Structures are given as structure tokens and as C-alpha cells.
Image (spheres, rainbow, N blue to C red):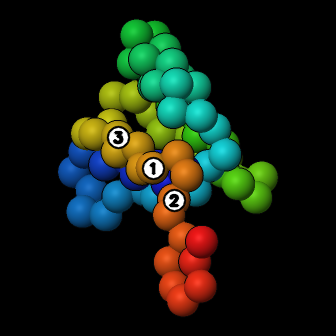
Amino acid sequence: MEIKVGVKNINREVVVESTDKPDEVREALTTALAEDGLFVINGERGRTVLVPSAGIGYVDLGEENARPVGFGAV
């Protein structure tokens, strides 16, 4: 699943491919915002992204299972 995080006062968004479920991401975001802590995103290849909750402008959760694209896609 693709996760996009818009950071306040920054033109570019943080984009991470994650294997986490949408509910897990929502729970982590809710906890980070409630505790004024860090929003932790676990990437597919062992990458970990930490975003201070005070700097989060928005979070966009992509499709959990992306559709295949191209010839012969089943």
C-alpha cells in the first residue's frame, strides 16, 4: 500500500510503500496525534520513516492491493 504524508511548510510529500494494513496505519496515526509523538511508517524493504505528528498536514492511504497494469494482466 502506498502512503503519502504531507508535511506542513514542505512542498514535497513523503511517499512510502508499506506492507502495513490501513487499519494499522490509522491506529498509529491516531496514537501519534493524541500523544503529540512520532508517526512511524514501516516500509516494504525494512525502511522506517518517522514523522513528528506536529508537522503532519495530511495522510493519504492508497489502495491496499494495487491493480495489475499491462498486457496479459489477469
Residue ID at (50%, 63%):
67
* One can see residue 16 in this view: no
Q: Mark 1 points at which residue?
A: 63
SS label for mark 2: loop
Q: Name the one closer to the observer, 57 or 74.
A: 74
SS label for mark 1: loop
Q: Mark 2 points at which residue?
A: 66
Residue ID at (45%, 49%):
63
Asked whether, in this view, residue 40 is left or right of residue 11, the answer is: right
Q: Mark 3 points at which residue?
A: 59
Report the Cα–Cα distance between label 2 and label 1.
6 Å
Q: How many marks?
A: 3
Q: Which amino acid does label 1 sit on?
A: Glu
Q: How crowded is mark 2: few (under 14 residues within 10 Å), some or many (20 or more)?
A: few
Q: In this view, does 26 lie above or below 74?
A: above
- The nearer-to-camera label among 3 and 2 is 2
Horizontal and vertical percent position of residue 11: 24, 63
Q: Which amino acid does label 3 sit on?
A: Val
